[in-house]
Image (tube, helix red, strand yellow):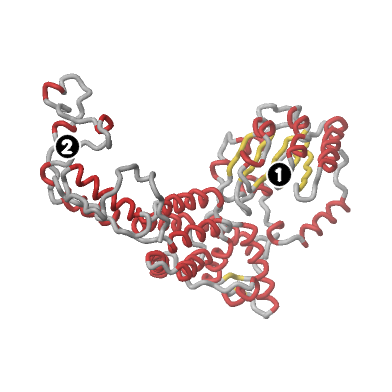
Amino acid sequence: MPAESLFDFVNREHEESRAPLAARMRPRTLDEVVGQGKLLKPGSPLRRLVDATSQSRAVPASVILWGPPGTGKTTLAHVVARSTDRHFLELSAITAGVKEVRAALDEARTQLAGYGRETVLFLDEIHRFSKAQQDSLLPAVENRTVTLIAATTENPYFSVISPLMSRSLLLTLEQLGEEDISDLIDRALVEQRGLAGTVTLAEDARAHLLRLAGGDARRALTALEAGAGAAKDSGSDEITVAVLEQAVDRAAVRYDRDGDQHYDVASALIKSIRGSDVDAALHYLARMVEAGEDPRFIARRLVISASEDIGLADPSALQTAVAAMQAVSFIGWPEARISLAQATIALAAAPKSNAAYLAIDAALADVRAGLAGPVPAHLRDSHYQGAGKLGHGQGYVYPHDLPNAVAAQQYAPDAVHGKRYYNPTRHGLEERYADRVVKLRSLLGSGEEPSSAESVELKGSGEGERREPS
């Protein structure tokens, strides 16, 4: 391979100087990469890719980088290419097809046969490739004509074909934290390839910039560059919140995540859900999203509300909230806002009951007051040798042997026998549980006989006529 000429070098330097700030600040070595500590430790697959020689076979044949936008997938591929003597080719699945893939593989074979130089093929957005397009990569990956580094924001177990997955190492990138983004901003402000100290960044503007970034390094540097340009155009050398707002056309949300606003807005969100005001709840959710609140914090609050404020009036509310929490852990910002909005709307519109919340607190109050007492002998464990001599398990009636699968025997300790902790409402689906609890307490001898209006056929709570939430 001929050496780079002086003309080529000057031309490349000129192109780099005109590149966007995010491209200019792209790390050139693994040591410059922020975040992703698990992937960069000594002996990791990426380290071995960078440190490998052309004769080494103790390196992964291919890797798939999976993570949210702006976490460094493209950067890591470029670092691998720059840190070795490998030829580097880059394709995007958005614009490339089988023809382009074949051309790249032909070039890789030429490099290997003519110059003994291995090729790193970086394929961005691999999840956009069809099965046939992904199949076209298999022979070259199998015989190591190329070292494939594929990047995706989608779950590769659903979007990448199994043969390619089995021939690759899957590396998961985490969303960057605020400290990581702040480090990148500091570098960009002072380094020669960045803004070279021509502007400064006010502290409140930095906080706003971190909110705008939402864990995306590329977005942070793009907004910083826009703010720097706006500051210079106005004859200033400082990027303020006002300048940044003007540059990115996005107002700053007055929200201190470590202060009162954090708790006030979170409280208002939950109280709006409890009060069944869908629109107010969405407003407070939007404020938290725009402020860059940790989506896991929001999701946890929704899960709590689903049990505390809705409970058995709509049991599916908890399922919805938990599903949203799981979705948030998979996708992060900005898409997580959609799952959180869906859960917020569902919870705010659901019928409300705090009966489960009151029930456990009432039971806890008795336990803390010392109303515990020994477990009745017939309920104690009788599986170990000698339990029978102690009378454990004797007289226990197995409920499944009875027609209604309800055995009228004492279950609670003497100290709280006959206590009622759960007092169901008749809101939404909890009416079904209320009817059943009345009948159960009657059969167990711990409550009054149901009236004719309350009498119900004893079935599982999931059987019989289904009442839709009111």
Left or right, 136 with reference to 241? right
Picture quadrant of residue 149:
top right
Q: Considering the image in quadrants, where does the N terminus appear? A: top right
Residue 241 position (above or below residue 361): below
Please tell me how many numbered marks the rendered image carries.
2
The tag on residue 126 is: 1
Residue 468, image x and y in percent? Answer: 42, 56
**Which residue type carries mark 2?**
Gln
Comparing labels 2 and 1, the label whose residue is closer to the camera: 2
Going from the N terminus, do you reach mark 2 or mark 1 first?
Answer: 1
Asked whether, in this view, residue 126 is left or right of residue 214, the answer is: right
Going 51% across and 59% down the picture, which residue do you hit?
A: 342
Where disc 1 sits, the SS reads helix
**Can residue 85 be seen in the rendering of this structure?**
no
The relative height of residue 160 versus residue 216 in the rendered view (above or below) is: above
Determine whether the residue tagged by mark 2 lies in a helix, strand or loop.
Answer: loop
